[in-house]
Image (tube, rainbow, N blue to C red):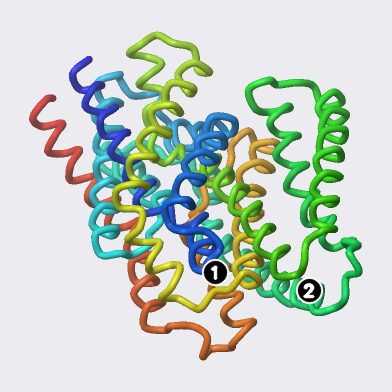
Amino acid sequence: MLELYAISLALAFYMAWGLGANDAANPCNCVVGAGVYPMRKALLTFVLFSALGGILFGSFVMKTFDRGLIQREQFETGTLVVGSLCAALAGCLWVTFSTWLGMPVSTTHSIMGGVLGFALATGAPVRWGTASKAFLSIPLSPLVAMGLAAGLFFLLRRYFRKHRRGVPNLLLTFLLYLPLFLVLFFSLFAGILKWGVEASLKATLLCSSAVLLVVLLWVKKSRNLELSCRLLILVHFLSAFAFGANDLANATGVFLTPTQRVLGTPSFQAMLLLSLLGVTGIAFGAFTWGYKVIDTAAYRVTKLNPLTGLAAEYSQAFTVLVFTTVPALLWKFGIPISTSISNIGTVVGVGLAAGGLGGIDRKTMAKILAFWILTIPCAALLSAFLFRVVNGVVG
């Protein structure tokens, strides 16, 4: 059993590597495509802030993959370890194949497909209530991100075209304050500290207001081009944080219950150990193959500049952050959305807003859409096949 569990952890690391390799493009493509950050610097900050997001918020979505999609209580530990292993391996293989081709696919949906394939092979009942929310996010998250990015592009273009006289207006204040408030509040209330609502609100209002004041004083002294570049860098940090919060569970979530059973550790300690394993794998993936998909997302979908990059990156970060935190507060399970699909949705949104259909490379988009459609069924079928084979060998 320990041998199988060790293999499972190796696969979790492999999946985390795939996350870093394929999904580093999500927080990095805009800042790189706009020419604000070089590739290596963008990857370094991506690793740092995604690690922070994964450790603080990773448990929200980790619980969805572990307990939210299928009823795991009925399985023996051995079956659960084999199923988790096969689900992770199926997702790993699909993500590796797609990354090799330079295609941004959803690691979230790859693992969802792997877990559902395990359920298909064993006849395990699926929790359709949670699964339906996750499936609803597949078309909803890119559409929300696309609309938000297009609208934000027009608002920001108007903001930067007028003479600001060094005074930031209400739009910029609101855009900076809202994600800062969400991150601080959920870090205190539902993250590691688990403060009460009242204490969390008071501390969040105080800290976020102080941070916002410093940022606005810094903004006041910036020229338009310099300001858009600096804001894009800040939003890149936020986007990497949101990525770690939502996507770390793709690599580690299916191993939460096996880790608790095999090692006998409490839920919190198991999630922390898996988070540390995941962020290490993400770092390796980002610095080895991360450039492959960044090249596609940054340069081959549409032409980016600091303004379009800012609108796209903010929209992507905000969409992922909301889907991760708000459902966790309402239903105790964060919604695992595809940061890849949301990211491409925002890039398409600003491309359409800035240049119409002519601003989008339709051939590249057709390839990306084909891989998106195939992800869940391919991962599910591969997972079911692997479970039959592995369970027959060790069973």
The residue wearing badge 2 is 160
Q: Is residue 2 above or below residue 321?
A: above
The residue wearing badge 1 is 34
Quadrant containing the N terminus in the rendered view: top left
Q: In this view, does 203 lie above or below 124?
A: above
Decide if residue 258 is on the left or right side of residue 202: left
Residue 38 seen: yes
The amino acid sitting under disc 2 is: Phe
Residue at figure coordinates x 62%, y 55% from the top left: 233
Residue at figure coordinates x 84%, y 28% from the top left: 203
Q: What is the spatial separation of the Cα atoms under label 1 and label 2, in whole angstroms?
A: 17 Å
| Residue 197: image location, x then y, percent | 82, 27
Q: Is residue 205 above or below residue 319?
A: above
**Residue 329 falls in image quadrant:** top right
| Residue 314: image location, x then y, percent | 65, 59
Q: Crowding near pointer 2: few (<14 within 10 Å), some, many (20+)?
A: some
Quadrant containing the C terminus in the rendered view: top left
Decide if residue 229 is on the left or right side of residue 162: left
Looking at the image, the residue that sits furthest to the left is: 393
Element type at marker 2? helix
| Residue 342: image location, x then y, percent | 54, 61
